[in-house]
């Protein structure tokens, strides 16, 4: 394999019309300005460089393959002086890996996530909403940060990611000895949920989550499982046999053929979940097998405008 990722990236950019490199650098000062909003943990006395340019260039170094503090400082030192100047860092800047490491370890992680996710959301933003604006899918899911294990705990993050662009638009750290549920509402509180459908796993099928999403102008598509026994039982009692087949997929992979079917049914009045207008049910099975491989039920508001299938 080549040691440089340039050839690999070029294969994925064949359909992109390249512009003047100097024009492309205009985004770097904007990124540095956004990262300047992160609270600076350093003392005012003795600061030599702005925080925003340091973080922006460090971010570029990591995206370029730098995996240690020493590599990050070497990459920054190897940047063209004009590029460093465009970012707001003096061309003669000399960085020490230990100093950069102390700075990064003291940053407010939530503030950094807010700044970077806000910047990515602005890049992925569509035009002004209208009556014909399609719904945008936003998936909320958690993950454990790789390499963060300590004798006491690990760092667990909850993120909101767009379905279409896979852009992380919000992210928060889940408090130690807690779970994702208390972090759900704070994660979405700073986002405009208009024309947005929030999807999440069964853990987040909570009444307060649904109320927050609807109050913010959004829609929800949640999965109902055994953690909501009454709701799950009421959903199973809906007239699924009479419901028409809305979608069917037939896929072959891993040596087997799998068929998935989905039905949508109007929710009956009195369903024990706020703002539930429709329910959907999907099942999957291997051809030649008498038993279904799995099935689940979901419910949401304005599901008919959203093509996402319930897993």
Image (cartoon, rainbow, N blue to C red):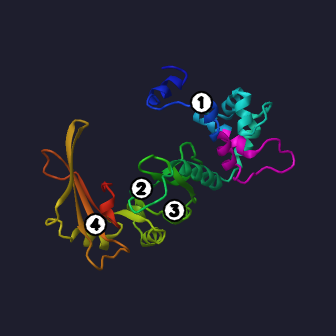
Circle nearer the N terminus (2, 4): 2
Q: Is residue 224 visible?
A: no
Circle nearer the N terminus (1, 4): 1
Crowd tier of the residue under label 4, counting other residues whose Cα lies within 10 Å: few below 14, some 14–19, many 20 or above:
many
Give the vertical position of 185 relative to 60 (above or below).
below
Circle 2 or circle 4, nearest the eye = 2
Circle 3 or circle 4, nearest the eye = 3
Query: Is 105 included in the stretch rendered in magenta?
Result: no
Q: Residue at image x 67%, y 29%?
A: 75
Q: Position of residue 250 (x, y in %)?
A: 20, 44
Q: CA distance from mark 1 to mark 2?
A: 32 Å
Circle 1 or circle 3, nearest the eye = 1
**Local secondary structure at mark 3:** loop
Q: Position of residue 271 (x, y in %)?
A: 30, 76
Circle nearer the N terminus (3, 4): 3
Location of mark 3 (residue):
192
Q: CA distance from mark 1 to mark 3?
A: 34 Å
Location of mark 2 (residue):
136
Q: CA distance from mark 3 to mark 4?
A: 25 Å
Q: Position of residue 277 (x, y in %)?
A: 31, 71
**Local secondary structure at mark 4:** strand
**Local secondary structure at mark 2:** strand
């Amino acid at each position: 394999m080549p040691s440089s990722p340039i050839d690999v990236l070029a294969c994925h950019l064949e359909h992109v019309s390249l512009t003047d490199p100097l024009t492309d650098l205009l985004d770097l000062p904007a990124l540095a300005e956004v990262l300047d909003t992160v609270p600076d943990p350093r003392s005012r006395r003795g600061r030599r460089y702005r925080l925003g340019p340091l973080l922006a260039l460090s971010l570029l170094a990591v995206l370029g393959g730098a995996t240690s503090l020493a590599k990050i400082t070497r990459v920054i030192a190897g940047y063209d002086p004009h590029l460093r100047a465009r970012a707001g860092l003096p061309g003669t800047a000399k960085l020490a890996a230990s100093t950069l490491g102390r700075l990064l370890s003291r940053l407010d992680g939530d503030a950094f996530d807010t700044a970077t996710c806000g910047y990515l959301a602005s890049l992925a933003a569509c035009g002004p909403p209208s009556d014909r604006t399609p719904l945008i899918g936003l998936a909320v899911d958690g993950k454990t940060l790789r390499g963060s294990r300590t004798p006491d705990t690990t760092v667990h993050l909850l993120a909101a990611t767009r379905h279409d662009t896979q852009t992380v638009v919000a992210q928060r750290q889940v408090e130690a000895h807690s779970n994702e549920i208390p972090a759900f509402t704070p994660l979405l509180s700073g986002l405009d949920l208009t024309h947005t459908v929030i999807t999440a796993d069964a853990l987040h099928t909570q009444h307060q989550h649904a109320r927050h999403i609807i109050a913010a102008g959004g829609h929800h598509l949640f999965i109902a499982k055994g953690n909501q026994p009454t709701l799950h039982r009421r959903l199973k009692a809906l007239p699924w046999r009479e419901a028409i087949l809305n979608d069917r997929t037939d896929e072959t992979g891993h040596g087997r053929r799998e068929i998935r079917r989905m039905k949508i049914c109007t929710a009956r009045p009195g369903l024990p979940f706020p703002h539930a207008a429709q329910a959907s049910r999907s099942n999957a099975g291997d051809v030649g097998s008498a038993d279904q491989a799995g099935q689940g039920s979901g419910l949401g508001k304005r599901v008919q405008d959203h093509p996402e299938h319930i897993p």
